[in-house]
Image: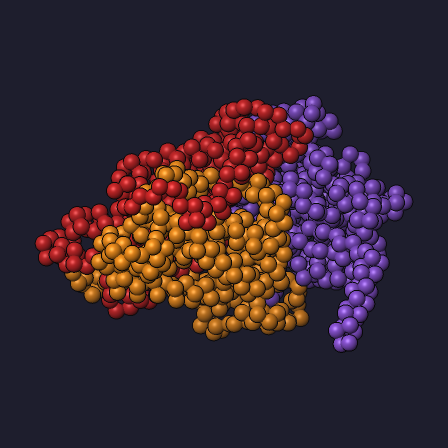
C-alpha cells in the first residue's frame, strides 16, 4: 500500500500512537501499584517501597491493606463498593456479549438486503434506521423506563440487553451494508448461476467474505453496550446485577475510595475486556490483512 | 404403586407449602438508598429481618449522584417504593407532590413526639414539612471550614476567624510560593455547591430569606451578597483553585499544595485517614469564619412513601423498619457514627463515650459538637431545589467573574419570587 | 442490484422491530411532552404549544450551550476522523511490533466514560496532574497550567479526552475499509504514482470515502450529544466554558423538574444534529445511499 517507511520514523509514529492511547492506562497501572502516601509524595516513587498489590488483594478477597491494620487507622474508611468490581465486570460481559450476538443475528441479514437488493420500502426503512439514533437517549429515558416497567423488565439483565441491542442496531446495519456492498458483484453472479437461493447466497457467499467486517461490527456493538451508562443505571437496581460502567462511575465519586484503590478497580475492569477484545480483533485483522474480501 | 406414593407425597408437600404461604403472608418492603457503605446497610437490614420475621426488606441502591433522578423516574413510572433515603432539599417538593407520607400516617403520635425531642435543631427542621415530621434522621452533618494545621504553623499564620483574615492568610501563603492556597469545590451541578455558599453566609450571620420567604440576598449589605463578592475577589486574585469534586480535593490537599477548603465534615475524616493519606493528621476544622461562626447543617432521613402508607400492612412494616433504623435506642445510628464516622442527628449520641472515642481519631470532638449545636438548617420549600438548580450556574458565573455579583443576586431573587408566586397560585 | 417485488419482511423485521420499539413510542411520547407543560411539582399536563421551545431558546444558558456544543463537535469529529485515518493507514502495513500497537490502540475503547474522565483528570489536574508535573520537570513551565479550570483551555482539554475515547472505533472501521481495497490496484498505483499523497488522494480515498462519511456522521452525532465525559471532568465549568446543550436535557428534566422543557431541548438538539448530518453528507458525496 505504501513504500517502506524509514524504520526510525515508523518507530517514532508507533511510539507516539502508543503514548497517546496507552499512556493514560499505563498511568492507571502505576497508580494501582503505588499507595497514595507514596504517590502523592514528590520525593517518593514506585521504587521507594516496590509495587504494592494490597489493593488488588482487597478487591478480590476483602482483606484490608496492611496500612489499615495500624492502631490509629479506621478500618471502616475503605469503601466496600470497590469489591463489587469483579462481579459487575462479569455482568457487563454477559450483557455486552448478548447485545453483540443479537446485533449480528438481527442486523447482518438486514444489512445484506439493503446492500444488494432494491425493494419497495427500502428508502423509507433505511432512512428510519439511520435517523433513529438522532434523538438523544436522555430524552427517552422516561418513556423507555415506563415501557420496560410495564413489561416487567426493570431490574433484569434482559431489559438492558434489549435497550443496548436496539441502540447499536442502526449503526450495525449501516456499517455492514457498506461492507456487503464492497463485495464484487461477480461473486454474486457466480452464485446466481449456481442457483443459490437468497439465503444461501447470504449464508454461504456473502457472510464468509465479510466475516472480518462482521467481527469489527460485532466489536462495535459490544463496546456500545459495555460503556453505556444511563440505561444500565436506571434499569439495574441491584448491586448483584449491576454492570461495571455504573459501578465505576460511583467509585470515581466515592470519598472512601483512595486514588490507589480507584486505579486498581480501573485496571481490573480493563484487563479481561481488553483480552477479549484483542482476541476478537486479532481474528478480524488477520482476516482483513490476508485479503478475505479480495476479488 | 411407586407412582401413587410419589403423587401422594407431592400432593402432601405442595399442600404444606400452600398452607405455609397462606399463613406466612410475608411483606416485602422496597427500600431505596444511595450506596454509601452498602454492606453496612445490608447488614443492618439482615438484623432487622432477624428481629422481625414476616417482613423482608429488598434493598435497591443507586449511586449518590444519580439517586435523585432515579427516584424521580421511579415516581413517574410508579415503581413500587416503600422506604427511601430522603434529602432535605427535596423533602418539601416530594411532600407537596404527594409522593411521601408524614410519619403520623404510619406511626402513633406519642411515639413520634418522644422521638422528636431527641432530634437536633437543624435536623428537626430538615425532616419537617408543612408542620409535620416526614422522617427520622439517618445522617446529619455540617459544612466545615478546613485548614492544614502544619502549613499554617510553618508559615506563622493564626487560624483565621473572619473572611478578611482568610484573604490575608491566603495572600501571605501565595507570596511564600503556594500558587493556590484555597481549593474550592466548584461544580454547578451539585447541590452542595449552593450549600457551601449558604454555610459561608451563615458564618457571617446572614439570612438569605426572611420569615415570609422573601429573598434578602440581592441587598449589597446582606452577608450572602458580601460573601459572593468575597469569593469573586478571591478568585480574581488567583487565590482559589476550582476542583470538580470533593474526592479529588482529598487527593489534592494531601499533596500539601493547598491550605484551606470548605466541604462537608465527613471529608475531614477521609483527609485524616492515616491508612491512606500521606498528610493524615494535618487537617483540622475551624469555626466558619465570619461574625456569627454559624454554619449550615443538614440531615438525610428515612422516609416512608405515600404508596406504602396507603397499604396498611406495608405501612406497619415500614414504620417498624424506620423505627429500627433511626429510632430508640439508636443502635443503628450509633453504629454508623462509630464505625464510619457518619454524622448523626440524634442528640443523645453526642454524649456517648464510644462515639466520642471513635471520632477523636480524626477531629476535635469539642469543636465539632459546638459546630453542630450552632448550625442552622437551610431554607427549603417546594420549589427551592428547582430554584437552586437555576441559581447555581449563576453563582458559578459570578465567582469566576463572568457575571457581576449584583446581576446574579438580582436574577436569583427575581426567579425565587416568580417561583413562589407560581407555586402559590397552583 | 437485484429487485424484489415484495417487502422482504423476514429479513428486515428482526432488525427493524427492536429499533421501532425503542424509538417510535418513546420519541412520540417525548415529542408530546415537549408540547405540554409537564412539571413534577404541578399537577396536570396542559397543552402549551411551542411555549417550551420558546422558553428554552430564550433561556440564559441556551446560547452558551449551543455555541460550546457546536465548537466541541467541530473540533472533535474531524480530529477523530483525520487521526483515525492516519493511524489506520500506518497500521495497515506490517512492521516489527505492529500487532502489539494494533492491540493497544484499542485501549481507550475498553473504558467506560466515567473512567476515561478519571484518567484524564489525572493527566490535567492542576495540583497532582501528570501533564503539569511532566512539563515542570522538563523545565518548560514554572507554575501549573490550570487546564481544566481556565476558560480558555477547558474546552480543548475535554476535546482531547473525547477524541481519545473515539479513536479506536475509527481505526477499527477504517482498517476494515482499507482491507477491502484490491491489492493489485494498490500495486498498480504504487508503480504509476510515486507521491504517496497523490496515491492516497486518487486511489485510496475514493475507496474508503463512504466509510469516512459514516465515521464523520457518527462522530458528529456522538460529539454533539455527549456530555458524560465532559461533565465528569469539569462539571460544565469554569463558568459556562464547557456547558453543553445535550446536558441541558437532563438538567431541565431532573434538576428543574421540567420535563416539557427537557424534551424541547432534546428536539432542538435533533434539529441541529439533522442539519449537521445533511451538511456532512452533502459536502462529501459518497455512494452510501446510491441505487446503482
Q: Nearer the viewer, residue B215 or B52?
A: B52
Q: Nearer the viewer, residue B205 or A211?
A: A211
Q: Specify the colour of chain A.
A: orange
Residue B106 lies, in percent from the top left, at 83, 45
Q: Nearer the viewer, residue A279 or A76?
A: A279
Residue B177 horizontal side relative to residue A192, left or right:
right
Q: Looking at the image, can residue C12 be seen?
A: yes
Which quarter shows the C terminus of chain A?
Answer: bottom left
Q: Looking at the image, can residue B173 be seen?
A: no
Whether B176 is drawn above or below A51: the answer is: above
Residue at 19 percent of width and 59 percent of height: C183
User: Which chain shows up in red?
Assistant: C
Most distant residue in the bottom direction? B2
Residue C272 lies, in percent from the top left, at 41, 33
Q: Specify the colour of chain B.
A: purple
Residue at 75 percent of width and 73 percent of height: B3
Whether B178 is drawn above or below C47: the answer is: below
Amino acid at each position: 500500500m505504501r513504500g517502506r517507511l524509514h524504520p526510525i520514523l515508523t518507530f517514532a509514529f508507533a511510539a507516539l500512537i502508543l503514548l497517546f492511547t496507552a499512556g493514560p492506562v499505563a498511568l492507571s497501572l502505576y497508580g494501582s501499584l503505588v499507595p497514595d502516601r507514596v504517590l502523592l509524595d514528590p520525593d517518593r516513587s514506585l521504587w521507594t517501597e516496590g509495587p504494592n498489590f494490597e489493593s488488588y488483594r482487597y478487591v478480590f478477597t476483602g482483606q484490608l491493606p496492611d496500612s489499615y491494620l495500624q492502631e490509629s487507622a479506621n478500618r471502616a474508611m475503605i469503601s466496600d463498593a470497590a469489591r463489587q468490581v469483579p462481579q459487575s465486570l462479569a455482568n457487563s460481559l454477559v450483557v455486552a456479549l448478548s447485545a453483540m450476538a443479537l446485533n449480528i443475528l438481527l442486523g447482518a441479514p438486514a444489512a445484506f438486503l439493503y446492500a444488494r437488493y432494491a425493494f419497495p420500502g427500502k428508502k423509507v426503512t433505511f432512512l428510519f434506521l439511520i435517523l433513529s439514533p438522532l434523538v438523544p437517549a436522555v430524552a427517552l429515558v422516561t418513556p423507555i423506563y415506563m415501557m420496560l416497567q410495564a413489561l416487567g423488565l426493570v431490574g433484569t439483565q434482559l431489559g438492558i440487553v434489549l435497550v443496548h441491542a436496539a441502540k447499536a442496531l442502526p449503526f450495525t446495519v449501516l456499517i455492514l451494508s457498506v461492507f456487503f456492498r464492497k463485495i464484487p458483484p461477480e461473486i454474486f453472479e457466480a452464485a446466481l448461476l449456481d442457483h443459490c437461493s437468497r439465503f444461501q447466497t447470504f449464508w454461504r457467499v456473502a457472510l464468509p467474505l465479510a466475516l472480518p467486517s462482521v467481527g469489527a461490527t460485532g466489536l462495535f456493538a459490544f463496546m456500545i453496550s459495555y460503556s453505556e451508562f444511563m440505561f444500565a443505571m436506571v434499569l439495574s437496581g441491584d448491586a448483584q446485577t449491576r454492570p461495571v460502567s455504573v459501578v465505576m462511575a460511583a467509585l470515581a465519586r466515592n470519598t472512601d475510595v483512595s486514588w490507589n484503590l480507584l486505579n486498581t478497580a480501573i485496571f481490573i475492569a480493563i484487563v479481561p475486556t481488553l483480552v477479549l477484545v484483542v482476541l476478537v480483533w486479532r481474528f478480524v485483522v488477520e482476516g482483513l490483512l490476508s485479503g478475505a474480501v479480495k476479488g | 404403586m411407586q407412582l401413587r406414593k410419589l403423587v401422594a407425597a407431592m400432593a402432601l408437600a405442595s399442600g404444606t407449602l400452600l398452607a405455609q404461604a397462606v399463613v406466612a403472608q410475608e411483606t416485602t418492603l422496597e427500600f431505596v438508598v444511595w450506596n454509601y457503605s452498602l454492606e453496612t446497610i445490608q447488614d443492618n437490614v439482615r438484623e432487622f429481618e432477624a428481629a422481625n420475621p414476616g417482613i423482608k426488606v429488598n434493598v435497591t441502591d443507586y449511586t449518590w449522584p444519580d439517586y435523585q433522578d432515579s427516584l424521580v423516574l421511579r415516581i413517574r413510572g410508579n415503581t413500587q417504593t416503600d422506604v427511601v433515603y430522603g434529602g432535605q432539599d427535596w423533602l418539601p417538593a416530594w411532600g407537596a407532590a404527594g409522593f411521601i407520607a408524614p410519619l403520623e400516617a404510619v406511626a402513633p403520635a406519642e411515639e413520634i413526639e418522644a422521638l422528636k425531642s431527641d432530634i437536633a435543631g437543624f435536623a428537626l427542621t430538615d425532616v419537617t414539612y408543612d408542620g409535620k415530621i416526614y422522617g427520622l434522621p439517618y445522617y446529619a452533618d455540617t459544612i466545615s471550614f478546613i485548614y492544614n494545621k502544619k502549613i499554617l504553623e510553618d508559615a506563622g499564620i493564626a487560624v483565621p476567624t473572619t473572611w478578611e483574615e482568610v484573604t490575608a492568610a491566603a495572600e501571605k501563603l501565595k507570596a511564600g510560593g503556594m500558587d493556590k492556597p484555597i481549593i474550592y469545590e466548584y461544580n454547578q451541578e451539585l447541590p452542595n455547591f449552593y450549600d457551601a455558599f449558604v454555610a459561608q453566609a451563615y458564618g457571617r450571620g446572614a439570612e438569605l430569606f426572611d420569615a415570609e420567604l422573601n429573598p434578602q440576598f440581592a441587598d449589597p449589605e446582606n452577608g450572602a451578597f458580601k460573601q459572593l463578592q468575597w469569593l469573586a475577589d478571591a478568585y480574581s486574585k488567583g487565590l482559589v483553585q476550582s476542583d470538580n469534586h470533593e474526592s479529588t480535593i482529598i487527593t489534592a490537599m494531601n499533596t500539601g499544595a493547598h491550605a484551606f477548603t470548605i466541604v462537608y465534615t465527613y471529608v475531614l475524616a477521609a483527609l485524616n485517614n492515616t491508612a491512606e493519606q500521606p498528610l493524615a493528621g494535618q487537617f483540622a476544622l475551624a469555626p466558619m469564619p465570619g461574625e456569627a461562626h454559624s454554619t449550615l447543617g443538614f440531615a438525610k432521613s428515612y422516609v416512608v412513601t405515600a404508596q406504602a402508607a396507603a397499604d396498611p400492612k406495608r405501612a406497619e412494616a415500614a414504620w417498624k423498619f424506620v423505627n429500627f433504623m433511626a429510632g430508640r435506642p439508636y443502635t443503628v445510628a450509633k453504629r454508623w457514627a462509630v464505625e464510619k464516622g457518619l454524622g448523626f442527628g440524634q442528640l443523645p449520641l453526642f454524649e456517648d463515650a464510644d462515639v466520642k472515642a471513635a471520632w477523636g481519631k480524626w477531629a476535635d470532638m469539642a469543636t465539632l459538637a459546638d459546630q453542630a449545636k450552632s448550625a442552622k438548617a437551610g431554607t427549603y420549600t417546594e420549589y427551592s431545589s428547582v430554584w437552586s438548580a437555576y441559581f447555581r450556574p449563576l453563582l458559578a458565573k459570578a465567582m469566576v467573574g463572568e457575571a457581576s455579583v449584583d446581576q446574579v443576586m438580582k436574577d436569583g431573587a427575581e426567579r425565587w419570587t416568580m417561583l413562589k408566586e407560581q407555586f402559590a397560585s397552583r | 442490484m437485484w429487485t424484489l417485488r415484495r417487502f422482504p419482511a423476514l429479513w428486515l423485521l428482526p432488525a427493524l422491530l427492536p429499533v421501532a420499539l425503542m424509538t417510535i413510542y418513546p420519541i412520540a411520547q417525548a415529542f408530546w411532552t415537549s408540547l405540554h407543560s409537564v412539571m413534577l411539582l404541578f399537577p396536570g399536563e396542559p397543552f402549551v404549544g411551542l411555549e417550551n421551545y420558546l422558553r428554552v431558546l430564550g433561556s440564559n444558558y441556551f446560547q452558551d450551550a449551543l455555541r460550546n456544543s457546536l465548537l466541541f463537535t467541530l473540533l472533535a469529529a474531524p480530529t477523530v476522523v483525520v487521526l483515525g485515518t492516519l493511524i489506520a493507514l500506518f497500521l495497515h502495513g506490517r512492521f516489527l511490533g505492529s500487532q502489539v500497537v494494533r492491540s493497544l490502540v484499542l485501549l481507550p475503547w475498553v473504558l467506560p466514560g466515567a473512567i476515561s474522565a478519571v484518567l484524564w483528570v489525572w493527566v490535567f489536574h492542576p495540583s497532582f496532574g501528570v501533564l503539569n508535573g511532566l512539563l515542570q520537570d522538563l523545565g518548560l513551565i514554572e507554575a501549573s497550567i490550570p487546564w481544566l479550570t481556565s476558560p480558555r483551555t477547558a474546552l480543548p482539554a475535554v476535546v482531547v479526552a473525547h477524541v481519545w475515547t473515539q479513536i479506536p472505533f475509527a481505526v477499527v472501521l477504517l482498517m476494515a475499509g482499507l482491507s477491502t481495497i484490491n491489492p493489485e490496484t494498490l500495486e498498480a498505483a504504487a508503480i504509476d504514482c510515486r507521491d504517496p499523497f497523490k496515491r492516497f488522494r486518487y486511489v485510496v480515498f475514493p475507496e474508503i470515502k463512504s466509510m469516512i462519511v459514516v465515521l464523520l456522521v457518527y462522530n458528529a452525532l456522538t460529539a454533539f450529544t455527549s456530555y458524560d465525559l465532559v461533565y465528569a471532568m469539569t462539571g460544565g465549568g469554569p463558568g459556562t466554558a464547557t456547558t453543553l446543550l445535550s446536558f441541558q436535557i437532563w438538567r431541565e428534566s431532573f434538576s428543574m423538574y421540567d420535563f416539557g422543557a427537557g424534551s424541547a431541548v432534546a428536539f432542538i438538539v435533533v434539529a441541529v444534529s439533522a442539519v449537521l448530518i445533511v451538511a456532512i453528507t452533502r459536502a462529501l458525496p459518497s455512494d452510501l445511499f446510491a441505487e446503482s
